[in-house]
Image (cartoon, rainbow, N blue to C red):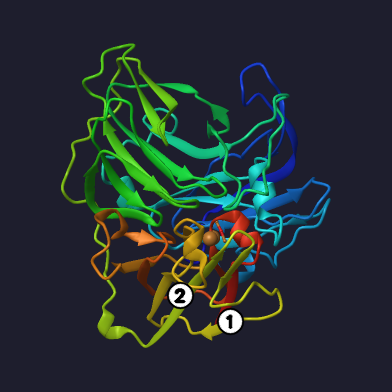
Amino acid sequence: NPDPTVAEYTLTADYGTTEIIKGISTDTLGYNGNILGPTIRSKNGEKIIIHVNNNLEDSTTVHWHGLIVPGEMDGGPHQIIKEGESWSPEFVLEQPALTAWYHPHLMGETATQVYQGLGGLWIHDDDISASLGLPEQYGVDDIPVIVQDRAFYKDGSLYYNSNMMEGAVGNIIMINGAVAPYTEVPSSWIRLRLLNGSNAAQHEINFSDGRKFYQIASDGGLMEYPVEMSSIKLAPGERAEILVDLQSMAEADSVSLMVSNIKSLELISDGTSTNEYVLTDHLVDIEKWSTDDIVNERSFDLEGMAHMVSINGERFDMDSLSFTLSTDTLEKWTVSNVSGSSGGMGMMGGGTEHSFHVHGLQFQVISRDGTLPPEGERGWKDTVFLKPGETVEILVKFTLEGIFMYHCHNLEHEDAGMMGQFQVV
Ligand code: C2O
Ligand code: CU
Ligand code: CU
């Protein structure tokens, strides 16, 4: 498209105060507001310009997690925006519709900046997703759900426990920056766009009445078909879109979304109907890469625990690249969580969980522990969870050039150096 439409957005990182817990005000950070940031909505093929202003008394960066953009626009640790300065990346997205997100990625301070409130959702649309009749009225039957755990002092200030063995984990669940909010919903099919934006904890998500729902999208977009389930686990950084049938709810009936067994978001029916969605057994076609076309293989051993974490024995160094590879080349990456299975760490309680995230693409998972991945992982992914001892094989193929990161999305692990970088040429 020689003359794409242009969409411009401004994100200003600044200080704020938020009533996260009723009646108490908490110092937070937000983009264009007190906590989190606006949901950015883009269309495939349109040109996007984002003006990021940094009003913090600290450097920051903003990374577009899940979006396929050139390395220089990726907002990783190299695209530093100093205090009082601005950065205006531009790109055209050419990728299937997805629920992505954006968050700081400053080396050594990603975890604390996210914890204090910096982050937001990014919804990308394309013609195929728009043609499926899915619930798509934002905030009505298509609802953003950013899940984050936090801990607080009695006075309401955020308690960031950096001494926790495996990252900051809180006992309070926030949904979109609020504790136990409710929202009115129609008596229709509802689409929830789930993001686990927590620093370190994996969360199990289900409904208070145990009702079934359907996962329709993984990190990188719609899956081939809806997968029925009654509970879903998301590691930090992972997203899923789910559909839940609320057609039989009468006005004022309610059901709650449970996050790690805590009632976290109440859905109260208003008795109206907003869509005529009919569940189908097909969503989109996904071209599966063939293992016959693999031209190179690499392995990534996730090792260690707490602050002693590494990938292939290395810690992040801003000045060194782990490897270089070419665009449009299919590689198989074998990712293993070896923490707990070597070095005597097993004594410490069975090892440490990690989640492996790659910038600059969406990948395909071909196996988990030697067998086919679960159905919810058979679509596009950019982050995978690994239990101690687990191995996941993924196929990668990059389309854009630049320097990109791979890292554990436990943000305390990432800040401790559980990250590496490579260059696509
Ligand atoms: Cu969500 Cu490298 O990050
Ligand atoms: Cu990312
Ligand atoms: Cu980790």
Q: Residues within 10 Å of mark 1 (few under 14, many from 20)?
A: few
- Ligand 2 - quadrant of the structure image: bottom right
Question: Where is 212 relative to 282, above or below?
Answer: above
Closer-to-camera residue (288/231): 231
Secondary structure beneath disc 1?
A: loop
> Which percent across, then down, holds residue 46?
50, 56
Which of disc 1 and disc 2 is earlier in sequence? Answer: 1
Measured as percent of width and height from the top left, residue 333 is found at 40, 76
Residue placed farthest to the bottom in the image?
A: 295
Residue that appears at 55% across and 77% down? 401
Quadrant for the C terminus in the image = bottom right
**6 in relation to 416, above or below:** above
In the rendered structure, the answer to whether residue 266 lies left or right of residue 217 reads right
Toward the top, the furthest residue is 252
Q: Where in the figure is residue 344, as x and y percent of width and height?
A: 51, 69
Which residue is found at the position 30% from the left and 17% from the top?
A: 272
Question: What residue sits right under mark 2 in the picture?
Answer: 398
**Residue located 28% across and 25% down the image:** 209
Q: Nearer the viewer, residue 81 or 395?
A: 395
Q: Quadrant of residue 178?
A: top right
- Residue marked by disc 1: 322
- The residues bearing labels 2 and 1 have C-alpha atoms spaced at a distance of 16 Å
The amino acid type found where label 2 is placed reads Phe
